[in-house]
Image (cartoon, rainbow, N blue to C red):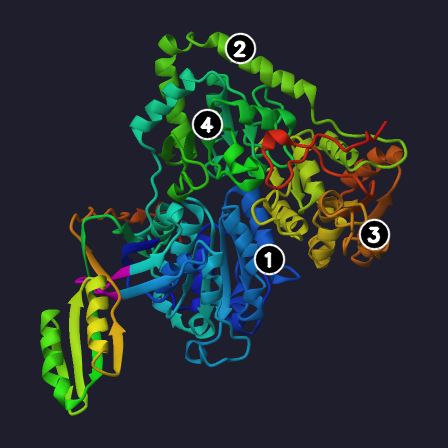
């Protein structure tokens, strides 16, 4: 007979069984029993400085590994502080399990101290959520939460546990299967549709692969590469899918969309067949939907049927797991190859030439200046050190777009960013989670001076754990992306975007006990960045960049993606 | 347009909130909603009439089907189905109108379920248009109060219910108890 355990011990037992080695959280009144049990547990708990960052760190952990990230918060304010990061995980389909404490069952609904309706508040912020009413259902619910978070289209799941359930005593009843009759998702995809898709791929004269975050979630980058190589098709990866194709692969063009490259946007616009894999036709990719890829037929592969034909009607919808479906499409291509391949080879050649010409016409090249550090110069230096192999956790804004344009990623799970929700403050805590998940990897947290200041308290977490995260601040003294829009669309009436009083980075890092430095001269940038990377512990490098640089190319909101603005009116740089 | 959705959901706390949340989050107004247990007490059947952008009808069904507690969501707007509504009307009437009211009710297949010196409570069922007409007729006889059940519907071509089977978690079996 298994020993008598408390609910809190059972929670930890479930986490261990789910192979959780690290989780992120912040204790409070109703989670006291859980933290008491943690005292004797082998699970590592990382104390962050704010619950939002516990969830962002859990996301960083999940995004860097594909495993479920776990975070924990107390009732009331602890739980409500998770909201932004939960929605962020929902938008980007990141597997996260959040455990929140709740007031005791007999107090629920009485406006007890630190009571909030966490179950109600987080319902639209999660893929699914639970409130545990008694000890008997606790293990089942926790294992279900992990199953839901990590399967199908991944997402965050919250489990709200009242204090008396943590305290109650009982036995851990092994849960060896999960039964959720309403939770259906198809993995394999329809064989007939897959066959038709393969035929269409051979028939197309100007095919393009449009791949997204779904490739990462289903671990399908190997299958994607094989498909793209065998069919010899040019490909683009979305902001969420960067690294799904190696940046330097000859079949890879670059990122499409609002700040995508000329070649990527032109190729999507002129294509006659889009093979859309794990994407959701986000407005930041498509621009004006009616003008998006107007000549293309659409093959859309996604595990979530609600994404198919949501924004763009699919000619061949395939509901299934990207890995399995792509593998099957390639198999079918191989079977069909002899009779179909030769048919349009001249058209294909012309298409490849066109795509290469577009790429050569307007390549994404960093700008340099001898006077001041261009933000693009900074990203080029990070890229040089990374060589396509470092983890780059980005915040949200201009720097995020320059990172996405100019830093290479040779593998999936190196590029970590808040894509769908665009949550400022994401970069630093997500880098913490990623570094815990990948202790041997070089991890950059690249932040703007705005987003960084939303997460400054987490410098404490970095210091406490001596995490060797390299924090690089692209400091232009402005909320740069908002300033860019005010310049371009609001007659340059700069309203509340000037960030004055940025703290002295040396003193700031010094206050937390590690090294901080500012670099202002282009000639000193490379050495300063190298010094940061060579330094064994955490490092804060504040890089003063051109104040009024804008991100280009740019598709104005509501514009078609082939109508992008390529460069500022007057050329800059040397 | 008014979309009629029939749902089979797990009879669990919060299930109703999840379904209505999908609609409310898109700004769709629910015209009527009924929920009751099915033969299996662990399941409920819901009928919802909701004002949806015509282009979004399919998306709404897909989003509702994604909910973990929903076993099946079906669009009955155009499908072969029986749609009925129950109406209870309390009418205050003068003594001389009583017989006429009962005759009028009879024409609509309604019946008096309660009677007092002040008037009647009448019960009628039928499609919504007929119920509108019934209410208009009875209204002429005096003060009325109306409670409508909202549309309940049963599909005439039941779709085969596809359910997810249990998922075995081998890694949970393999491990020892390790908390000690």
Examine the residues drawn in magenta and state their main secondary structure. strand
Using the numbered discs, state the Cα–Cα distance from disc 2 to disc 3 in whole angstroms: 53 Å
Q: Which subunit holds the residue at mark 1?
A: A
Answer yes or no: do the residues labelled 4 and 3 have beta carbons within 8 Å? no
The range drawn in magenta is B35-47
Provide residue A369's location: percent of width, then percent of height: 86, 31
Secondary structure under tag 1 reads helix
Using the numbered discs, state the Cα–Cα distance from disc 3 to disc 1 in whole angstroms: 24 Å
Provide residue A275's location: percent of width, then percent of height: 46, 27
Label 3 belongs to which residue? A505
Q: Tell which of A299 and A388 is nearer to you.
A: A299
Task: Write the residue at 71% across / 41% down.
Answer: A399
Q: Tell which of A223 and A298 is nearer to you.
A: A298
Label 2 belongs to which residue? A349
Q: Residues within 10 Å of mark 1 (few under 14, many from 20)?
A: many
Vertical placement of A547 versus A380: above or below?
below
Residues flagged by tags 3 and 1 on a common chain: yes
Label 4 belongs to which residue? A275
> Could you tell which of marks 3 and 1 lies nearer the N-terminus?
1
Answer yes or no: do the residues labelled 1 and 2 have beta carbons within 8 Å? no
Using the numbered discs, state the Cα–Cα distance from disc 4 to disc 2 in whole angstroms: 18 Å
Task: Write the residue at 62% across / 37% down.
Answer: A258
Q: Which subunit holds the residue at mark 3?
A: A
> Could you tell which of marks 4 and 2 lies nearer the N-terminus?
4
Residues flagged by tags 4 and 1 on a common chain: yes
> Could you tell which of marks 4 and 3 lies nearer the N-terminus?
4
Answer yes or no: do the residues labelled 4 and 1 have beta carbons within 8 Å? no
> Could you tell which of marks 4 and 1 lies nearer the N-terminus?
1
Q: Which mark is residue A54?
A: 1
- The nearer-to-camera label among 4 and 1 is 4
Residues flagged by tags 2 and 3 on a common chain: yes
């Amino acid at each position: 007979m298994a020993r008598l355990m408390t609910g809190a011990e059972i929670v930890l037992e479930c986490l261990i069984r789910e192979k959780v080695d690290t989780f992120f959280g912040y204790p409070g009144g109703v989670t006291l029993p859980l933290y008491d049990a943690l005292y004797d547990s082998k699970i590592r708990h990382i104390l962050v400085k704010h619950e939002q960052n516990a969830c962002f760190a859990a996301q960083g952990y999940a995004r860097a590994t594909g495993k479920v990230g776990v975070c924990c918060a107390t009732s009331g304010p602890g739980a409500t502080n998770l909201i932004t990061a939960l929605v962020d995980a929902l938008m980007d389909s990141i597997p996260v399990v959040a455990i929140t404490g709740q007031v005791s069952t007999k107090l629920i609904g009485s406006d007890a101290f630190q009571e909030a309706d966490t179950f109600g508040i987080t319902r639209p912020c999660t893929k699914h959520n639970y409130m545990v009413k008694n000890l008997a259902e606790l293990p089942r619910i926790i294992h279900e939460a992990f199953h839901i978070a990590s399967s199908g289209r991944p997402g965050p799941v919250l489990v709200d546990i009242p204090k008396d359930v943590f305290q109650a005593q009982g036995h851990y009843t092994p849960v060896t299967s999960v039964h959720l009759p309403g939770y259906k998702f198809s993995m394999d995809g329809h064989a007939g549709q897959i066959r038709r898709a393969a035929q269409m791929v051979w028939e197309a004269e100007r095919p393009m692969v449009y791949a997204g975050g779904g490739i990462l979630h289903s671990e399908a980058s190997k299958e994607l590469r094989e498909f793209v190589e065998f069919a010899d098709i040019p490909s683009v990866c979305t902001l969420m899918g960067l690294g799904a194709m190696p940046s330097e692969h000859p079949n890879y063009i670059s990122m499409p969309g609002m700040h995508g490259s000329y070649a990527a946007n032109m190729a999507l616009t002129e294509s006659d067949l889009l093979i859309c894999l794990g994407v959701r036709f986000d407005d930041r990719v498509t621009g004006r939907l009616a003008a998006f890829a107007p000549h293309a037929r659409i093959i859309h592969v996604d595990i979530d049927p609600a994404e198919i034909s949501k924004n763009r009607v699919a000619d061949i919808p395939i509901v299934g797991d990207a890995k399995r479906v792509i593998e099957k499409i390639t198999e079918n291509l191989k079977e069909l190859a002899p009779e179909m391949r030769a048919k349009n080879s001249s058209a294909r050649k012309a298409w490849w030439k066109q795509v290469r010409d577009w790429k050569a016409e307007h390549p994404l090249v960093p700008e340099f200046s001898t006077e001041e550090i261009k933000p693009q110069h900074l990203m080029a230096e990070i890229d040089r050190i990374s060589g396509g192999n470092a983890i780059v956790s980005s915040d949200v804004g201009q720097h995020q777009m320059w990172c996405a344009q100019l830093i290479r990623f040779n593998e999936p799970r190196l590029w970590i960013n808040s894509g769908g929700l665009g949550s400022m403050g994401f970069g630093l805590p997500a880098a913490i989670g990623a570094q815990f998940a990948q202790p041997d990897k070089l991890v950059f947290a690249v932040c703007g001076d705005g987003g960084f200041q939303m997460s400054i308290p987490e410098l404490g977490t970095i210091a406490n754990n001596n995490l060797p995260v390299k924090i690089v601040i692209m400091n232009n003294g402005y909320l740069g992306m908002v300033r860019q829009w005010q310049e371009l669309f609001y007659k340059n009436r700069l309203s509340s975007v000037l960030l004055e009083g940025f703290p002295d980075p040396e003193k700031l890092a010094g206050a937390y006990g590690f090294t901080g430095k500012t670099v202002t001269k282009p000639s000193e940038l490379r050495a300063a960045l190298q010094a940061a990377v060579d330094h064994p512990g955490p490092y804060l490098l504040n890089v003063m960049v051109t104040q009024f640089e804008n991100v280009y190319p740019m598709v104005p909101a509501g514009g078609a993606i082939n109508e992008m603005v390529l460069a500022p009116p007057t050329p800059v740089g040397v | 347009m008014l979309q009629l959705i029939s749902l089979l959901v797990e009879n669990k706390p919060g299930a109703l909130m999840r379904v209505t949340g999908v609609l409310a989050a898109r700004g769709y107004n629910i015209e009527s909603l009924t929920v009751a247990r099915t033969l299996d007490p662990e399941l409920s059947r819901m009928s919802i009439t909701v004002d949806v952008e015509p282009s979004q009808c399919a998306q709404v069904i897909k989003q509702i089907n994604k909910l973990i507690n929903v076993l099946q969501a079906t669009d009955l707007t155009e499908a072969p189905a029986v749609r009925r509504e129950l109406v209870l009307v309390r009418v205050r009437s003068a003594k001389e109108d009583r017989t006429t009211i009962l005759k009028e009710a009879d024409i609509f297949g309604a019946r008096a379920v309660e009677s007092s010196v002040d008037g009647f409570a009448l019960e009628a069922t039928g499609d919504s248009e007929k119920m509108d007409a019934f209410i208009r007729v009875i209204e002429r006889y005096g003060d009325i109060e109306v409670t409508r059940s909202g549309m309940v519907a049963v599909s005439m071509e039941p779709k085969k219910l596809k359910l997810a089977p249990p998922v075995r978690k081998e890694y949970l079996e393999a491990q020892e108890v390790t908390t000690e």
